[in-house]
Image (cartoon, helix red, strand yellow):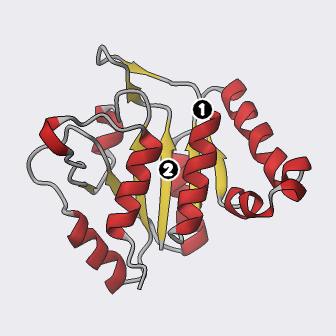
Amino acid sequence: MLYIALLHYPVRNKDGKVVATAIANMDIHDIARTAKTYGVKAFYVVNPVAAQRELASRIVDHWRQGFGASFNPFRKDAFELVRIDTALEDVIADITARSGKKPRIIATGANFEGGLLKSSDLREMIKRNDLPYLLIFGTGSGLADDAVRQADDRLEPIRGKDGYNHLAVRSAVAVILDRIVDTK
């Protein structure tokens, strides 16, 4: 059972300070569709700012039950996976309640080094058992140390060509899910 969460807090800005980032409409759309494609059980959008959660709720409601639901049924299906929460602890509690087991938390990041979980090993772990796994992705300039410390593992980063490594989070989600989900 695979779950994903997009954290807008605690994350780092380009100066390394811990901040809360704004929700991006495109992230919700693209990550929901990717999550649906790869069989993710739920996609959590996590932001501590009430006005930001309200914005996300309005976007999601438009595609679940508003004009968007009848206009684009495929997008409606993807948006059924979206959950909006205040904190990572809320996500963990929800997954635990849904599955009866605390999820194994896997942090993602572009700059992780040393002692990392390989994508191929995570794919095998997911295939071999029915434990819930939660991949956490950070916005801004990545997850803050507080979020990473809550993880059981850190996933190896995506390595591009010639050392360039600055993907949009929605692109990183797609690449990682393609690497860890067995589609056979």
Q: Is residue 17 left or right of residue 6?
A: left
Residue at mark 2 to residue at mark 1: CA–CA distance: 14 Å
Near mark 2 (Cα within 10 A), the count class, few <14, some 14-19 or many ≥20, is many
Q: Is residue 86 at least partly visible in the picture?
A: no
- The residue that appears at 80% across and 50% down in the rendered structure is 63
Where residue 117 appears, as percent x and y from the top left, is: 19, 60
CA neighbours of label 1 inside 10 A, class few (<14), some (14 to 19), many (20+): few
Q: Is residue 15 above or below residue 28?
A: above
Q: Quadrant for residue 182, please give it.
A: bottom left
Mark 2 or mark 1: name the one nearer the start of the chain.
2
Q: Residue furthest front?
A: 162
Taking the view exactly as shown, the residue that stands out farthest to the left is 114
Residues at circles 2 and 1 in contact by the CB criterion of under 8 Å: no
Q: Which residue is mark 2?
A: 5
Identify the secondary structure beneath mark 2.
Answer: strand
- Disc 1 target residue: 24
Outermost residue to the top: 15
The residue sitting at 35% across, 76% down in the picture is: 126
Q: Position of residue 132 (x, y in %)?
A: 44, 71
Residue 101, position as x, y percentages in the image: 47, 72
- Looking at the image, which is closer to me, 85 or 78? 78
Say what amino acid the circle numbered 2 marks.
Ala
Residue found 59% across the figure and 61% down from its top: 42
Quarter in which the C terminus is drawn: bottom left
Residue 3 appearing in the image: yes
Find residue 129 and report its image quarter.
bottom left
Amino acid type of the residue that numbered disc 1 sits on in the rendered structure: Ala
Q: Secondary structure at mark 1?
A: loop
